[in-house]
Image (cartoon, rainbow, N blue to C red):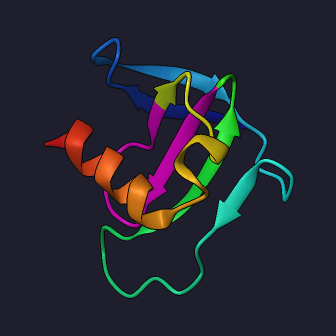
Amino acid sequence: MEYLVYTPQEGRLQTLRVELTTENTTWFNDNRKTGDIASISDVEGGLLIQTLDHHYPLWMDGLSRKDIGYSRRKARELHQQEIT
């Protein structure tokens, strides 16, 4: 499936071909509010962060789920840092 993602390193939107699987994605199913981190995925040599809101998914080149300890909190910090 193709995703339109925001790439902060380039400051633009781009299209990535993404297949979300149990091997490359961590889902957070206990979301409570808009803006919560829904999932983090290892995609195309980067980290894809998806939230429960109207923002495009964020793709961080050169990062992985392992790099952030599979942490929702660290994903939230990255997302807030890059979106604001």
Q: Position of residue 5 (x, y in %)?
A: 46, 32
In this picture, residue 23 sits left or right of residue 11: right
Q: Is residue 70 visible?
A: yes
Q: Quadrant of residue 36?
A: bottom left
Q: Is residue 61 magenta?
A: no
Residue drawn at x 59%, y 54% as measured from the top left: 69
Residue drawn at x 57%, y 37% as measured from the top left: 47
Q: Is residue 51 magenta?
A: yes
Q: Is residue 55 visible?
A: no
Could you tell me which quadrant the N terminus lies in?
Answer: top right
Magenta range is 46-59
Q: Position of residue 54 (x, y in %)?
A: 31, 56
Q: Where 59 sits versus 48, above or below?
A: above
Q: Position of residue 76 (x, y in %)?
A: 35, 58
Question: How many numbered badges does the structure rendering display?
Answer: 0
Pick the residue in front: 27 or 56: 27
Q: Position of residue 71 (x, y in %)?
A: 52, 62
Q: Where 1 sits versus 68, above or below?
A: above
Q: Where 43 sits versus 52, above or below?
A: above
In this picture, residue 39 sits left or right of residue 79: right
Residue drawn at x 34%, y 45% as measured from the top left: 78
Pick the residue in front: 44 or 55: 44
Residue drawn at x 58%, y 74% as measured from the top left: 28
- Residue at the left extreme of this rendering: 84
Could you tell me which quadrant the C terminus lies in?
Answer: top left
